[in-house]
Amino acid sequence: MWSEQGYLRLVRASGVYDLLVTLAFATPWTFVLLHGQLLALHQALGLAGEMPTFGPLHMLMANLMGSIVCVWAWLRIRHPQRRFGRYDAAGRVLFACWQGYALGQGATQLVWGVLVLEMVWAVLQWWPVKKNARAVAMA
């Protein structure tokens, strides 16, 4: 079980993780560099699955996702709250579902690493939090 303070540190840490992982998705210029690195890693590891070339619409979707996740991450870093952690856990389950779907459709096996981390963060953020002793005394 998490303490309240421990849980808020976890919410902030998940925001830092998301910011670091998705910042490169937020602009076309940074995503081109990231995509090149991911393609090289995919090829170097000889992984199954497809690592497609991104067209303008793909780029738009990647940039939209990167932008909104960066904003959401910054909110959790600056103002960590229990409810934000719970919402984030739900979002991570949704992301993991779509990542699983992509894997089933032939996406690069690199997605497995992200999917596993999404589920770990989701479980950690859904873990129970101890009632605050002061809040219990006031009830």
Image: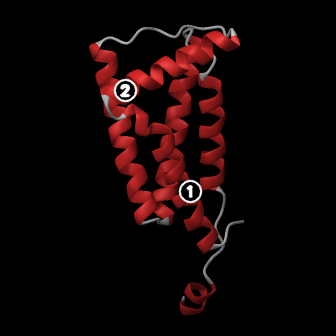
Residue 92, percent from left and from top: 53, 41
Three-letter amino acid code at disc 2? Answer: Ala
Q: Between residue 127 and residue 55, name the one nearer to us.
A: 55
45 above or below 113? above
Q: Which of the two discs, 2 and 1, labels the residue nearer the N terminus?
A: 1
The structure residue drawn at horizontal position 42% and vertical position 34%, both measured from the top left corner, is 24
Residue 95, percent from left and from top: 50, 33
Q: Quadrant of residue 75?
A: bottom left
Residue at the spot of label 1:
13
Q: Tell me the CA gap for discs 2 and 1.
A: 23 Å
- Say what secondary structure mark 1 lies in: helix
Residue at the spot of label 2:
62
Using the rendered image of the protein, determine whether residue 108 is visible from the camera's viewpoint. Answer: no
The structure residue drawn at horizontal position 54% and vertical position 25%, both measured from the top left corner, is 99
Q: Between residue 56 and residue 92, name the one nearer to us.
A: 56
Q: Quadrant of residue 97?
A: top right
Quarter of the image that includes the N terminus: bottom right
Few, some or many residues within 10 Å of mark 2 (<14, 14–19, 20+): some
Using the rendered image of the protein, determine whether residue 21 is visible from the camera's viewpoint. Answer: yes
Q: Between residue 77 and residue 24, name the one nearer to us.
A: 24
